[in-house]
Amino acid sequence: MASSLADQELLAAAARGDQAAFSQLYQRYRNRVYGFAYRMLGTQEVAEDVTHEAFLALIRQPERYQAERGSLLTFLCAVARNHIYQHLRHQERYATEPVETSDEYEEAGVRYSFDPLNDLLERELAAVVEAALARLPVAQREAVTLREYQELSYEEIATVIGADTNVVKARLYRARQALAKRLAPYLNQETAPRA
Amino acid sequence: MNCHEIISQLGALLDQELEQAQASMMRRHLGHCIECQVELERLRALKAALQNAGPPAVSARLDERVMATFRMQHGRASAISKVSGWRAWIFNSFAIPKPALSLIVALLIGTAALAYKAGEIAGLRSQVVTPPAPIYSPVVATRQAIEPAHVVYIKTPGGCSRSNSLPSAMLAQKGSTKSAGAQAAVSQFETQASASEAGIDYTTRAALENLEPVKDASVRVIKGENR
């Protein structure tokens, strides 16, 4: 709640032209908004465009954010989501090349083979996770991303996607089942039950 | 709750999204169910793997782009609010309510259109050439009475005739009296006018009707009053 009040205060100051206040808000949420866009779209450049658009809404129309409807992060993610879906629809309509596959990610992991072993394993796992995420249906990928990376509550996710919390639960369950299945070879060593 | 129901809620348990009572019930089940424990650990490992795969860092380019947008947006607003004197007056002049602004624009457009129209009419007037008065002659009077749309103009070797100069010139050339010349002019003009309208030149018509040709004048019949 304190964070929410601080957000509102910063936003009010930013609306009056206080650059330091806006900068603080931006630094607070940029990684999470950008992370959401990047996970959903898979390209750095477009994710940056989406992040810029989300903060642009905050700059031009700060009054659009209503604290009673959710946190500022929820608002930013909702704005980003609109742009993400625009890009996804555009990609579907004009796609001429297939979306990056897991093989390509695995090859990307191999390219890091000059790194130390631990680094290699981490990078390879990260690449495989990225690939598994990318292969999820958009709605499931969205739910996992908002939960695992943006750390939104189920209720906040429901606000962002405009659905019921039961829908969020169901999507998360299916997404996790699919991810666990695809990442099984990388998770087996850690799935032994604790004594 | 059976194992299937427990497993379907494990994610919510890890996310701390369950009611206290439901979470307690699940923990009791997990205390003695190995299969559900394995599933719980698998989900924990998955969450750890997901956390491990962070997106690339935000570039400095994006930071600068966003902050530049902020500066531009608020720089423009502060530029308007901070000006004073005549610049403030100009800025304030544009701060007119939209309905009033629309009315002013409409009035300006209407005034401009009227001014243009008035100028156009004045320009046309200045370009109007007063047509020469019709030749005063019985022929013309007769022909105008019969066919008011027909005006007869006569050209002489010296140029275009005036209405009151040609008949006298013709009469003087023929050496007749005014009344006799007028009669001759009537005859010749009738013949010339009808010959022109019929597509027969005067010389042919004169030969046919045994008339004396007028060699130094020609007749042109123009339909309509405006040349």
Image (cartoon, rainbow, N blue to C red):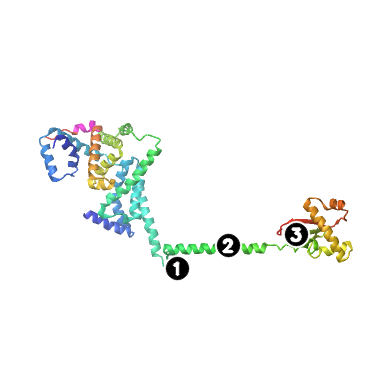
Spatial separation of the CA atoms under disc 2 and disc 1: 32 Å
Residue most extreme to the right: B175
- Residue A153 seen in this snapshot: no
Q: Which residue is mark 1?
A: B86
Spatial separation of the CA atoms under disc 2 and disc 3: 42 Å
Amino acid at circle 1: Trp
Q: Is residue B30 left or right of residue B128?
A: left
Same chain for the residues at labels 2 and 3, yes or no? yes
Amino acid at circle 2: Tyr
Same chain for the residues at labels 1 and 3, yes or no? yes
Amino acid at circle 3: Ile
**In front: B125, or A125?**
B125
Q: Earlier in the sequence, mark 1 or mark 3?
A: 1
Spatial separation of the CA atoms under disc 1 and disc 3: 74 Å
Q: Which residue is mark 2?
A: B116
Q: Of circles 2 and 3, which is in front?
A: 3
Q: Secondary structure at mark 1?
A: helix
Residue A152 coordinates in the image, percent (x, y): 24, 46
Q: Which residue is mark 3?
A: B146
Residue B76 coordinates in the image, percent (x, y): 40, 59
